[in-house]
Image (cartoon, grey):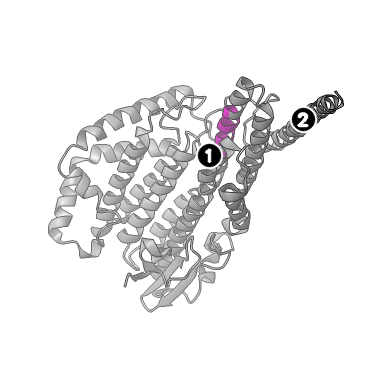
Amino acid sequence: MRLRSCFLYTVAFLLVAVVCVAIAVTTVARGQRAASLERLNATLAARGFSIGEAGAPNAPAPLPPEVAPGDTPADEEDAESVLRAFADLMARVKERQQGEHWRPMLDLIGGEDPRSWSEAQWGQLRDFLDANQDLIEAVRLLAAKGQPLVRLPWPFNPEASQEHLSVARELARLLAVDALLGGHDGDYDRTAVDIEACLGFADAIARDGWVTSGLFSFAIVGIAHVALRDAVAPGALTAAESAALVEAMGGAYGRDTLAICLAREATVGQQALEEHRARNVFLRPMWDIDQAAHAEMMDTLIAAADRPYYEVLPELEAMEAQLEGGLPFLRVITRVSVPALTRTLQAQARRVATVDLMRMGLLLERQYADNGQYPDSLDAIAPDLGGTVPVDPFTGEPYRYLPSGDTFRLYSVGPNGADDGGMHDARRGDIVWRGREAE
Protein backbone atom coordinates (compact mmCIF):
# COMPACT_ATOMS: atom_id res chain seq x y z
CA MET A 1 0.00 0.00 0.00
CA ARG A 2 2.82 2.35 0.93
CA LEU A 3 4.60 1.61 -2.36
CA ARG A 4 1.43 2.28 -4.25
CA SER A 5 0.96 5.58 -2.44
CA CYS A 6 4.56 6.56 -3.21
CA PHE A 7 4.02 5.68 -6.85
CA LEU A 8 0.84 7.76 -7.03
CA TYR A 9 2.56 10.70 -5.32
CA THR A 10 5.45 10.39 -7.75
CA VAL A 11 3.14 10.33 -10.76
CA ALA A 12 1.20 13.27 -9.42
CA PHE A 13 4.40 15.18 -8.78
CA LEU A 14 5.62 14.45 -12.30
CA LEU A 15 2.31 15.53 -13.80
CA VAL A 16 2.41 18.77 -11.85
CA ALA A 17 6.02 19.29 -12.94
CA VAL A 18 5.13 18.68 -16.57
CA VAL A 19 2.22 21.11 -16.34
CA CYS A 20 4.44 23.72 -14.70
CA VAL A 21 7.12 23.26 -17.36
CA ALA A 22 4.49 23.49 -20.10
CA ILE A 23 3.08 26.67 -18.58
CA ALA A 24 6.58 28.13 -18.26
CA VAL A 25 7.49 27.22 -21.86
CA THR A 26 4.19 28.61 -23.10
CA THR A 27 4.67 31.84 -21.17
CA VAL A 28 8.26 32.29 -22.32
CA ALA A 29 7.41 31.44 -25.93
CA ARG A 30 4.49 33.85 -25.90
CA GLY A 31 6.69 36.59 -24.47
CA GLN A 32 9.44 35.99 -27.03
CA ARG A 33 6.89 36.04 -29.83
CA ALA A 34 5.35 39.31 -28.62
CA ALA A 35 8.72 41.05 -28.24
CA SER A 36 10.00 39.82 -31.62
CA LEU A 37 6.81 40.80 -33.42
CA GLU A 38 6.94 44.25 -31.84
CA ARG A 39 10.48 44.82 -33.18
CA LEU A 40 9.62 43.45 -36.61
CA ASN A 41 6.45 45.53 -36.80
CA ALA A 42 8.45 48.68 -36.10
CA THR A 43 10.86 47.81 -38.92
CA LEU A 44 8.02 46.98 -41.30
CA ALA A 45 6.16 50.18 -40.48
CA ALA A 46 9.08 52.15 -41.90
CA ARG A 47 8.50 50.29 -45.20
CA GLY A 48 4.73 50.75 -45.31
CA PHE A 49 3.85 47.28 -44.01
CA SER A 50 2.18 45.91 -40.90
CA ILE A 51 1.67 42.46 -39.45
CA GLY A 52 -0.95 43.70 -37.05
CA GLU A 53 -1.38 43.10 -33.34
CA ALA A 54 -2.37 39.46 -33.80
CA GLY A 55 0.60 38.67 -36.00
CA ALA A 56 -1.38 38.41 -39.23
CA PRO A 57 -0.11 40.60 -42.08
CA ASN A 58 -2.15 43.40 -43.55
CA ALA A 59 -2.10 43.65 -47.34
CA PRO A 60 0.70 45.97 -48.48
CA ALA A 61 0.30 48.56 -51.17
CA PRO A 62 2.15 47.98 -54.45
CA LEU A 63 5.52 49.63 -54.89
CA PRO A 64 4.94 53.15 -56.22
CA PRO A 65 6.63 54.46 -59.34
CA GLU A 66 9.54 56.81 -58.89
CA VAL A 67 8.26 60.38 -58.73
CA ALA A 68 10.58 63.29 -59.45
CA PRO A 69 10.05 66.64 -57.67
CA GLY A 70 7.17 68.47 -59.31
CA ASP A 71 5.72 65.31 -60.88
CA THR A 72 2.55 63.52 -59.85
CA PRO A 73 2.14 59.76 -59.55
CA ALA A 74 0.69 57.97 -62.56
CA ASP A 75 -3.04 57.46 -62.16
CA GLU A 76 -4.81 54.13 -62.08
CA GLU A 77 -5.74 54.31 -65.74
CA ASP A 78 -2.09 54.67 -66.69
CA ALA A 79 -1.17 51.74 -64.44
CA GLU A 80 -3.82 49.58 -66.10
CA SER A 81 -2.55 50.56 -69.54
CA VAL A 82 0.95 49.37 -68.56
CA LEU A 83 -0.45 46.03 -67.40
CA ARG A 84 -2.32 45.59 -70.70
CA ALA A 85 0.67 46.67 -72.78
CA PHE A 86 2.97 44.19 -71.06
CA ALA A 87 0.44 41.37 -71.43
CA ASP A 88 0.29 42.12 -75.16
CA LEU A 89 4.09 42.24 -75.31
CA MET A 90 4.36 38.86 -73.59
CA ALA A 91 2.05 37.32 -76.17
CA ARG A 92 4.17 38.67 -79.03
CA VAL A 93 7.39 37.46 -77.44
CA LYS A 94 6.06 33.93 -76.91
CA GLU A 95 5.05 33.79 -80.57
CA ARG A 96 8.46 34.95 -81.80
CA GLN A 97 10.37 32.64 -79.49
CA GLN A 98 9.36 29.89 -81.88
CA GLY A 99 11.43 31.44 -84.66
CA GLU A 100 14.75 29.81 -85.56
CA HIS A 101 16.84 32.96 -84.99
CA TRP A 102 15.45 34.09 -81.63
CA ARG A 103 17.55 31.93 -79.31
CA PRO A 104 20.89 32.10 -81.19
CA MET A 105 20.71 35.89 -81.43
CA LEU A 106 19.88 36.48 -77.77
CA ASP A 107 22.48 33.99 -76.59
CA LEU A 108 25.15 36.32 -77.96
CA ILE A 109 25.05 38.22 -74.68
CA GLY A 110 27.60 36.74 -72.31
CA GLY A 111 28.86 34.39 -75.02
CA GLU A 112 31.59 34.88 -77.57
CA ASP A 113 33.44 38.22 -77.42
CA PRO A 114 31.77 40.60 -79.94
CA ARG A 115 35.23 41.68 -81.12
CA SER A 116 35.59 38.25 -82.71
CA TRP A 117 32.30 38.36 -84.65
CA SER A 118 32.43 38.38 -88.41
CA GLU A 119 30.64 40.95 -90.55
CA ALA A 120 28.30 38.16 -91.61
CA GLN A 121 27.31 37.64 -87.95
CA TRP A 122 26.78 41.38 -87.49
CA GLY A 123 24.61 41.34 -90.62
CA GLN A 124 22.48 38.51 -89.23
CA LEU A 125 22.10 40.39 -85.97
CA ARG A 126 21.07 43.57 -87.82
CA ASP A 127 18.39 41.70 -89.78
CA PHE A 128 17.09 40.08 -86.60
CA LEU A 129 16.85 43.41 -84.78
CA ASP A 130 15.18 45.11 -87.73
CA ALA A 131 12.50 42.42 -87.60
CA ASN A 132 11.95 43.01 -83.87
CA GLN A 133 12.13 46.80 -83.59
CA ASP A 134 8.48 46.88 -82.54
CA LEU A 135 9.35 44.86 -79.43
CA ILE A 136 12.33 47.07 -78.66
CA GLU A 137 10.24 50.24 -78.90
CA ALA A 138 7.54 48.70 -76.71
CA VAL A 139 10.09 47.82 -74.01
CA ARG A 140 11.57 51.31 -74.09
CA LEU A 141 8.12 52.82 -73.55
CA LEU A 142 7.26 50.48 -70.68
CA ALA A 143 10.63 51.06 -69.02
CA ALA A 144 10.02 54.81 -69.05
CA LYS A 145 6.69 54.41 -67.20
CA GLY A 146 8.23 53.21 -63.93
CA GLN A 147 5.15 51.07 -63.22
CA PRO A 148 4.76 47.42 -62.14
CA LEU A 149 4.33 45.21 -65.19
CA VAL A 150 2.04 42.67 -63.53
CA ARG A 151 -0.30 42.56 -60.56
CA LEU A 152 0.40 39.51 -58.41
CA PRO A 153 -2.20 38.22 -55.91
CA TRP A 154 -2.12 39.04 -52.21
CA PRO A 155 -1.79 37.00 -50.08
CA PHE A 156 0.96 35.68 -52.32
CA ASN A 157 0.34 32.34 -53.99
CA PRO A 158 3.65 30.52 -54.69
CA GLU A 159 1.93 28.71 -57.55
CA ALA A 160 1.00 31.97 -59.28
CA SER A 161 2.53 32.29 -62.73
CA GLN A 162 6.04 33.76 -62.82
CA GLU A 163 6.18 33.58 -66.61
CA HIS A 164 6.49 37.36 -66.87
CA LEU A 165 9.94 37.18 -65.27
CA SER A 166 11.45 34.92 -67.91
CA VAL A 167 9.84 37.01 -70.67
CA ALA A 168 11.28 40.18 -69.11
CA ARG A 169 14.74 38.65 -69.15
CA GLU A 170 14.32 37.77 -72.82
CA LEU A 171 13.35 41.34 -73.59
CA ALA A 172 16.35 42.65 -71.65
CA ARG A 173 18.58 40.46 -73.82
CA LEU A 174 16.89 41.93 -76.88
CA LEU A 175 17.73 45.45 -75.70
CA ALA A 176 21.27 44.33 -74.95
CA VAL A 177 21.98 42.98 -78.44
CA ASP A 178 20.50 46.18 -79.89
CA ALA A 179 22.93 48.14 -77.68
CA LEU A 180 25.77 45.98 -78.99
CA LEU A 181 24.85 46.75 -82.58
CA GLY A 182 24.74 50.46 -81.74
CA GLY A 183 28.28 50.23 -80.40
CA HIS A 184 29.48 48.32 -83.45
CA ASP A 185 28.01 50.97 -85.77
CA GLY A 186 29.32 53.85 -83.64
CA ASP A 187 25.75 54.86 -82.82
CA TYR A 188 26.24 55.41 -79.09
CA ASP A 189 22.98 57.31 -78.77
CA ARG A 190 21.26 54.03 -79.64
CA THR A 191 23.42 52.18 -77.11
CA ALA A 192 22.60 54.73 -74.42
CA VAL A 193 18.85 54.54 -75.05
CA ASP A 194 18.92 50.74 -74.88
CA ILE A 195 20.96 50.62 -71.67
CA GLU A 196 18.74 53.21 -70.00
CA ALA A 197 15.69 51.18 -71.03
CA CYS A 198 17.27 47.97 -69.73
CA LEU A 199 17.88 49.54 -66.33
CA GLY A 200 14.37 51.01 -66.27
CA PHE A 201 12.95 47.62 -67.16
CA ALA A 202 14.91 46.04 -64.29
CA ASP A 203 13.31 48.53 -61.93
CA ALA A 204 9.82 47.84 -63.34
CA ILE A 205 10.27 44.09 -62.81
CA ALA A 206 11.23 44.63 -59.18
CA ARG A 207 8.12 46.72 -58.55
CA ASP A 208 5.82 43.79 -57.95
CA GLY A 209 7.72 43.63 -54.65
CA TRP A 210 8.80 39.98 -54.31
CA VAL A 211 12.33 38.70 -53.77
CA THR A 212 12.14 36.45 -56.85
CA SER A 213 11.36 39.50 -58.95
CA GLY A 214 14.20 41.38 -57.29
CA LEU A 215 16.65 38.63 -58.25
CA PHE A 216 15.47 38.76 -61.87
CA SER A 217 15.90 42.52 -61.69
CA PHE A 218 19.51 42.05 -60.55
CA ALA A 219 20.08 39.66 -63.46
CA ILE A 220 18.80 42.26 -65.93
CA VAL A 221 21.22 44.85 -64.51
CA GLY A 222 23.96 42.29 -65.13
CA ILE A 223 22.82 41.92 -68.73
CA ALA A 224 23.01 45.70 -69.16
CA HIS A 225 26.51 45.71 -67.67
CA VAL A 226 27.84 43.09 -70.10
CA ALA A 227 26.19 44.79 -73.10
CA LEU A 228 27.53 48.24 -72.22
CA ARG A 229 30.99 46.94 -71.46
CA ASP A 230 31.21 45.13 -74.80
CA ALA A 231 29.49 47.87 -76.82
CA VAL A 232 31.76 50.73 -75.77
CA ALA A 233 35.23 50.64 -77.29
CA PRO A 234 37.98 52.24 -75.14
CA GLY A 235 37.96 55.99 -75.67
CA ALA A 236 34.96 55.89 -77.99
CA LEU A 237 32.39 57.79 -75.90
CA THR A 238 32.23 61.55 -75.88
CA ALA A 239 32.02 63.42 -72.58
CA ALA A 240 28.32 64.16 -73.17
CA GLU A 241 27.49 60.52 -73.92
CA SER A 242 29.34 59.32 -70.82
CA ALA A 243 27.66 61.94 -68.62
CA ALA A 244 24.16 61.03 -69.83
CA LEU A 245 24.66 57.34 -69.07
CA VAL A 246 26.26 57.97 -65.68
CA GLU A 247 23.27 60.10 -64.68
CA ALA A 248 20.83 57.42 -65.86
CA MET A 249 22.57 54.82 -63.71
CA GLY A 250 22.41 56.85 -60.51
CA GLY A 251 19.05 55.32 -59.59
CA ALA A 252 19.88 51.75 -60.61
CA TYR A 253 21.16 50.46 -57.26
CA GLY A 254 17.82 49.12 -56.00
CA ARG A 255 18.64 49.24 -52.27
CA ASP A 256 15.15 50.34 -51.20
CA THR A 257 13.58 47.80 -53.53
CA LEU A 258 15.40 44.92 -51.84
CA ALA A 259 14.39 46.07 -48.36
CA ILE A 260 10.74 46.31 -49.44
CA CYS A 261 10.88 42.88 -51.07
CA LEU A 262 12.26 41.41 -47.84
CA ALA A 263 9.52 43.18 -45.90
CA ARG A 264 6.92 41.49 -48.09
CA GLU A 265 8.59 38.12 -47.59
CA ALA A 266 8.54 38.72 -43.85
CA THR A 267 4.77 39.23 -43.93
CA VAL A 268 4.30 36.06 -45.98
CA GLY A 269 6.33 33.99 -43.50
CA GLN A 270 4.46 35.48 -40.58
CA GLN A 271 1.18 34.73 -42.30
CA ALA A 272 2.11 31.05 -42.68
CA LEU A 273 3.18 30.84 -39.05
CA GLU A 274 0.02 32.55 -37.84
CA GLU A 275 -2.12 30.07 -39.79
CA HIS A 276 -0.27 27.10 -38.25
CA ARG A 277 -0.54 28.68 -34.82
CA ALA A 278 -4.30 29.19 -35.17
CA ARG A 279 -4.93 25.61 -36.34
CA ASN A 280 -2.75 23.81 -33.79
CA VAL A 281 -3.71 24.96 -30.31
CA PHE A 282 -1.73 22.27 -28.50
CA LEU A 283 1.40 23.00 -30.56
CA ARG A 284 1.05 26.75 -30.20
CA PRO A 285 4.20 27.15 -28.04
CA MET A 286 6.23 25.54 -30.84
CA TRP A 287 4.79 27.92 -33.42
CA ASP A 288 5.33 30.84 -31.04
CA ILE A 289 9.04 29.94 -30.85
CA ASP A 290 9.23 29.54 -34.63
CA GLN A 291 7.42 32.83 -35.21
CA ALA A 292 9.77 34.66 -32.83
CA ALA A 293 12.87 33.23 -34.56
CA HIS A 294 11.51 34.11 -38.01
CA ALA A 295 10.63 37.65 -36.90
CA GLU A 296 14.09 38.22 -35.41
CA MET A 297 15.94 36.97 -38.50
CA MET A 298 13.75 38.87 -40.95
CA ASP A 299 14.16 42.03 -38.88
CA THR A 300 17.94 41.58 -39.16
CA LEU A 301 17.80 41.00 -42.92
CA ILE A 302 15.58 44.00 -43.63
CA ALA A 303 17.86 46.26 -41.59
CA ALA A 304 20.93 44.77 -43.30
CA ALA A 305 19.59 45.71 -46.74
CA ASP A 306 20.33 49.37 -45.94
CA ARG A 307 23.96 48.72 -44.96
CA PRO A 308 27.06 47.91 -47.02
CA TYR A 309 27.45 44.19 -47.63
CA TYR A 310 30.95 44.00 -46.17
CA GLU A 311 29.59 45.38 -42.88
CA VAL A 312 26.74 42.89 -42.56
CA LEU A 313 28.64 39.84 -43.88
CA PRO A 314 29.68 38.62 -40.39
CA GLU A 315 26.04 38.80 -39.25
CA LEU A 316 24.87 36.91 -42.34
CA GLU A 317 27.51 34.23 -41.89
CA ALA A 318 26.50 33.79 -38.25
CA MET A 319 22.84 33.56 -39.28
CA GLU A 320 23.60 30.98 -41.97
CA ALA A 321 25.65 28.90 -39.51
CA GLN A 322 22.77 29.01 -37.07
CA LEU A 323 20.31 27.96 -39.77
CA GLU A 324 22.54 25.13 -41.00
CA GLY A 325 23.39 23.54 -37.69
CA GLY A 326 22.57 25.52 -34.62
CA LEU A 327 18.87 26.33 -34.93
CA PRO A 328 16.61 23.95 -32.95
CA PHE A 329 14.45 21.71 -35.10
CA LEU A 330 11.29 23.36 -33.75
CA ARG A 331 11.89 26.38 -36.04
CA VAL A 332 10.22 24.68 -38.99
CA ILE A 333 9.17 27.64 -41.16
CA THR A 334 12.27 29.66 -40.28
CA ARG A 335 14.61 26.85 -41.36
CA VAL A 336 12.80 26.54 -44.71
CA SER A 337 12.20 30.17 -45.67
CA VAL A 338 15.09 32.24 -44.34
CA PRO A 339 18.25 30.60 -45.84
CA ALA A 340 17.47 31.57 -49.44
CA LEU A 341 16.72 35.12 -48.34
CA THR A 342 20.15 35.60 -46.75
CA ARG A 343 21.70 35.11 -50.19
CA THR A 344 19.69 37.95 -51.70
CA LEU A 345 21.97 40.42 -49.94
CA GLN A 346 24.95 38.96 -51.77
CA ALA A 347 23.01 39.34 -55.02
CA GLN A 348 22.30 42.95 -54.08
CA ALA A 349 26.02 43.54 -53.43
CA ARG A 350 26.77 42.18 -56.90
CA ARG A 351 24.25 44.64 -58.31
CA VAL A 352 25.87 47.54 -56.42
CA ALA A 353 29.31 46.53 -57.71
CA THR A 354 27.95 46.19 -61.25
CA VAL A 355 26.39 49.66 -61.25
CA ASP A 356 29.46 51.22 -59.60
CA LEU A 357 31.71 49.68 -62.25
CA MET A 358 29.50 50.89 -65.10
CA ARG A 359 29.45 54.44 -63.77
CA MET A 360 33.16 54.57 -63.00
CA GLY A 361 34.06 52.93 -66.31
CA LEU A 362 32.08 55.52 -68.24
CA LEU A 363 33.61 58.38 -66.28
CA LEU A 364 37.07 57.02 -67.07
CA GLU A 365 36.09 57.05 -70.75
CA ARG A 366 35.03 60.66 -70.27
CA GLN A 367 38.45 61.45 -68.83
CA TYR A 368 40.05 59.85 -71.88
CA ALA A 369 37.84 61.87 -74.22
CA ASP A 370 38.75 65.10 -72.39
CA ASN A 371 42.46 64.51 -71.78
CA GLY A 372 43.59 61.86 -74.24
CA GLN A 373 44.59 59.49 -71.46
CA TYR A 374 43.18 57.61 -68.49
CA PRO A 375 43.84 59.08 -65.03
CA ASP A 376 46.40 57.64 -62.64
CA SER A 377 43.79 56.96 -59.95
CA LEU A 378 40.04 56.87 -59.44
CA ASP A 379 40.26 60.06 -57.40
CA ALA A 380 40.11 61.96 -60.70
CA ILE A 381 36.44 60.95 -61.17
CA ALA A 382 35.40 61.55 -57.55
CA PRO A 383 33.79 64.97 -58.30
CA ASP A 384 31.40 63.30 -60.76
CA LEU A 385 30.47 60.70 -58.13
CA GLY A 386 29.40 63.15 -55.47
CA GLY A 387 32.90 63.79 -54.17
CA THR A 388 33.71 60.25 -53.04
CA VAL A 389 34.78 57.16 -54.98
CA PRO A 390 32.63 54.18 -53.90
CA VAL A 391 34.29 51.14 -52.34
CA ASP A 392 33.94 47.50 -53.29
CA PRO A 393 30.81 46.24 -51.46
CA PHE A 394 32.45 42.86 -50.90
CA THR A 395 35.52 44.18 -49.07
CA GLY A 396 35.02 47.82 -48.12
CA GLU A 397 38.28 48.51 -49.94
CA PRO A 398 38.81 50.50 -53.17
CA TYR A 399 37.85 48.89 -56.45
CA ARG A 400 40.85 47.56 -58.34
CA TYR A 401 41.96 50.09 -60.96
CA LEU A 402 45.10 49.55 -63.03
CA PRO A 403 45.64 52.07 -65.87
CA SER A 404 47.96 51.04 -68.69
CA GLY A 405 48.45 53.33 -71.68
CA ASP A 406 45.30 53.39 -73.80
CA THR A 407 43.43 50.90 -71.64
CA PHE A 408 42.91 49.92 -67.99
CA ARG A 409 41.60 47.24 -65.69
CA LEU A 410 38.66 48.01 -63.40
CA TYR A 411 36.96 45.35 -61.32
CA SER A 412 35.53 44.16 -58.00
CA VAL A 413 37.00 41.09 -56.33
CA GLY A 414 33.47 39.68 -56.08
CA PRO A 415 31.83 37.40 -53.49
CA ASN A 416 34.88 35.22 -52.85
CA GLY A 417 36.98 38.24 -51.85
CA ALA A 418 39.95 36.96 -53.88
CA ASP A 419 41.75 39.21 -56.36
CA ASP A 420 42.11 37.29 -59.63
CA GLY A 421 43.50 40.24 -61.50
CA GLY A 422 40.27 41.19 -63.24
CA MET A 423 40.07 37.97 -65.20
CA HIS A 424 37.00 37.41 -67.39
CA ASP A 425 35.85 34.14 -65.85
CA ALA A 426 32.51 33.88 -64.03
CA ARG A 427 33.79 30.92 -62.02
CA ARG A 428 36.62 32.92 -60.47
CA GLY A 429 34.53 35.59 -58.79
CA ASP A 430 35.83 38.91 -60.15
CA ILE A 431 33.15 41.30 -61.43
CA VAL A 432 34.80 43.09 -64.31
CA TRP A 433 34.36 46.26 -66.35
CA ARG A 434 37.71 46.12 -68.12
CA GLY A 435 39.99 43.23 -67.30
CA ARG A 436 42.09 40.50 -68.81
CA GLU A 437 41.10 37.38 -70.67
CA ALA A 438 40.75 34.02 -68.92
CA GLU A 439 43.90 31.92 -69.00
Residue 433 in percent (x, y) is at: 40, 63
Residue at the (55%, 35%) spot, across then down: 265
Residue drawn 46% across the image and 52% down it: 249
Instruction: Give the farthest residue toward the right.
Output: 2
Q: Secondary structure at mark 2?
A: helix
In which quadrant of the rendered image does the C terminus lie?
Answer: bottom left
Question: Does 188 appear in magenta?
Answer: no
Looking at the rendered image, the quarter that the N terminus falls into is top right
Residue for badge 2: 18
Left or right relative to 206: residue 324: right
Q: Residue 308: percent from the left, percent from the top?
A: 59, 55
Q: Residues within 10 Å of mark 1 (few under 14, many from 20)?
A: few
Please name the residue that numbered disc 1 is placed on.
336
Please give the range of residues in magenta: 261-272
Quadrant in the rendering for residue 35: top right
Comparing 230 with 322, the one in front is 322
Main SS class of the magenta portion in the image = helix
